[in-house]
């Protein structure tokens, strides 16, 4: 039998490729659909789409070929002959891009069976949209669809149905780079428009993301950064450069990691699981830095007065006993009177002007040498000249005024703290030894560090338990 006789090309009134095979009977033509997926590309979270290379197989019964004289199936791959045959006008509603394969020949095949059954196969490369919910990213599971529907014929003329046996077939060696296919389901759907209802089919792919990549690239590095920030608790309180460098470096590193992953994700209006993890790690590192700030303040709150004043302390005879026990870190509360030189009083430079220490020391030494003031004396009266004449008064300079201002600030500070007193007996009996308070503060700072060595790891472990348990339950 010749092909032109089978298609009735010379007699178009007997065969119309625009009519459905069952149009003469007034029923809808049933088309069976099957898909063979050759490749399944990774899902792009930014564009929310994925690419599939598939074979679309369509099968229907051509009633006009029932009375043919075929003895065996005929395969056709000539597009010129195929276009004269009626074919279902189907399309993919959720496809963003499509491409028909032409290499090395047009990938199309049409097989006509002796009983009038026609098998039509196309190879297509399609990009489908997949609206993803990233609230649990990267511990999420996604549901993606492939929809196929009738474009022209309504349900009165064309009905699409799935194959009875395994309508969705996958390539045996097919593996997704980021996801694992948990389940594949087939469903029927119906699209309704103002001109009628159209038959529709959809394949549902249940996907679960493989967390291995993100464990290595995000979770493990940030966890190590948090652990490294805890090294600060084992460093000495006085190791300020080391602890500051460690805290700032870890904080900037975890912020950089968070920013790099945020740039790879779409901008959404909700918080993702990875955002919670990165934010918590940043908080742990930041709290470690804050802990050092608190500890450093407690440990050095009173010790700075000792460092500023210990070089210029002149102890009275009653205060020397304390200085012998703990030289030179004892401060005697020696009163000041108008006739007493301020050199004989324990001088502590005001904390408001720490930069003036070297200048004050230079001025003191110059005054001692130039005016004959004895550091160990209780009086600031300059020594009289040998000729018996009255000693000239030392001229007042701007330098002396500056030193006097510092001295007055120190006295105000001492009086406010109960360190300075005008009671001679009380000051001789009660000596304010700064190392005792210094020691208490140092012990308190070390105790806080020791507590944080245990508290921070316990809190981080508890956070991990709650975090992983919560998102594992959501992904079940």
Image (cartoon, rainbow, N blue to C red):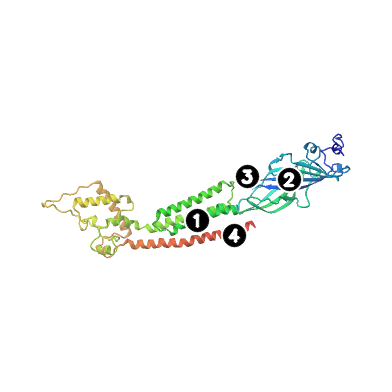
Give the number of the mark in front: 2 or 1: 2
| Tag 1 residue | 226
The image shows residue 322 at horizontal and vertical percentages of 27, 64
The image shows residue 239 at horizontal and vertical percentages of 40, 56
Whichever of labels 4 and 1 marks the residue nearer the N terminus, that label is 1
Query: Toward the viewer: 364 or 99?
Result: 99
SS at mark 4 in the image: helix
Name the outermost residue toward the left. Answer: 387
Whichever of labels 3 and 1 marks the residue nearer the N terminus, that label is 3
Q: Quadrant of the C terminus?
A: bottom right
SS at mark 1 in the image: helix
CA gap, disc 2 to disc 1?
50 Å
Whichever of labels 2 and 4 marks the residue nearer the N terminus, that label is 2
Whichever of labels 4 and 3 marks the residue nearer the N terminus, that label is 3
CA gap, disc 4 to disc 3?
30 Å
Whichever of labels 2 and 1 marks the residue nearer the N terminus, that label is 2
CA gap, disc 3 to disc 1?
33 Å
| Tag 4 residue | 469
| Tag 3 residue | 47
Above or below residue 135? Residue 18 is above
| Tag 2 residue | 55
């Amino acid at each position: 039998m010749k092909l032109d006789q089978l298609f009735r090309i010379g007699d178009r009134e007997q065969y119309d490729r625009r009519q459905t095979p069952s149009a003469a009977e007034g029923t809808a033509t049933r088309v069976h659909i099957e898909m063979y997926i050759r490749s399944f590309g990774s899902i792009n979270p930014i564009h929310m789409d994925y690419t599939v290379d598939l074979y679309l197989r369509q099968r229907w019964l051509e009633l006009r070929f029932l009375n043919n004289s075929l003895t065996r199936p005929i395969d056709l791959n000539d597009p010129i002959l195929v276009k004269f045959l009626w074919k279902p006008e189907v399309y993919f509603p959720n496809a963003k891009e499509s491409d028909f394969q032409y290499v090395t020949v047009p990938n199309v095949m049409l097989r006509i069976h002796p009983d009038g059954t026609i098998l039509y196969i196309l190879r297509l490369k399609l990009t489908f949209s997949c609206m993803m919910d990233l609230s649990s990213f990267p511990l999420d599971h996604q549901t993606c669809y492939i929809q196929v529907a009738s474009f022209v014929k309504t349900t009165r003329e064309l009905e699409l149905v799935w194959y009875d046996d395994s309508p969705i077939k996958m390539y045996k060696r097919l593996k997704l780079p980021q996801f694992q296919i948990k389940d594949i389901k087939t469903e029927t759907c119906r699209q309704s428009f103002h001109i009628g209802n159209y038959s529709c089919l959809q394949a549902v792919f249940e996907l679960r993301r493989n967390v291995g990549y993100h464990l290595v690239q995000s979770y493990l590095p940030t966890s190590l950064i948090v652990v490294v920030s805890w090294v600060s608790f084992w460093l000495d309180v006085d190791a300020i450069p080391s602890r500051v460098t460690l805290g700032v470096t870890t904080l900037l590193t975890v912020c950089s990691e968070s920013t790099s992953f945020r740039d790879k994700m779409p901008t959404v209006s909700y918080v993702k699981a990875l955002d919670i993890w990165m934010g918590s790690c940043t908080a742990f590192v930041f709290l470690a830095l804050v802990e050092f700030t608190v500890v450093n303040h407690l440990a050095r709150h009173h010790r700075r007065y000792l460092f500023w004043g210990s070089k210029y302390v002149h102890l009275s005879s009653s205060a020397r006993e304390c200085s012998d026990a703990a030289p030179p870190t004892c401060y005697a509360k020696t009163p000041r009177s108008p006739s007493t030189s301020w050199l004989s009083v324990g001088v502590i430079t005001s904390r408001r002007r720490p930069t003036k220490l070297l200048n004050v020391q230079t001025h003191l030494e110059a005054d001692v040498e130039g005016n004959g003031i004895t550091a160990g004396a209780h009086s600031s009266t300059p020594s009289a000249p040998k000729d018996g004449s009255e000693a000239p008064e030392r001229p007042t300079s701007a330098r002396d005024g500056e030193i006097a201002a510092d001295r007055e600030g120190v006295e105000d500070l001492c009086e406010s703290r109960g360190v300075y007193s005008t009671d001679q007996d009380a000051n001789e009996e009660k000596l304010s030894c700064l190392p005792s308070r210094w020691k208490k503060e140092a012990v308190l700072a070390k105790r806080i560090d020791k507590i944080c060595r245990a508290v921070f790891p316990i809190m981080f472990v508890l956070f991990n338990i709650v975090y992983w348990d919560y998102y594992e339950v959501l992904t079940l």
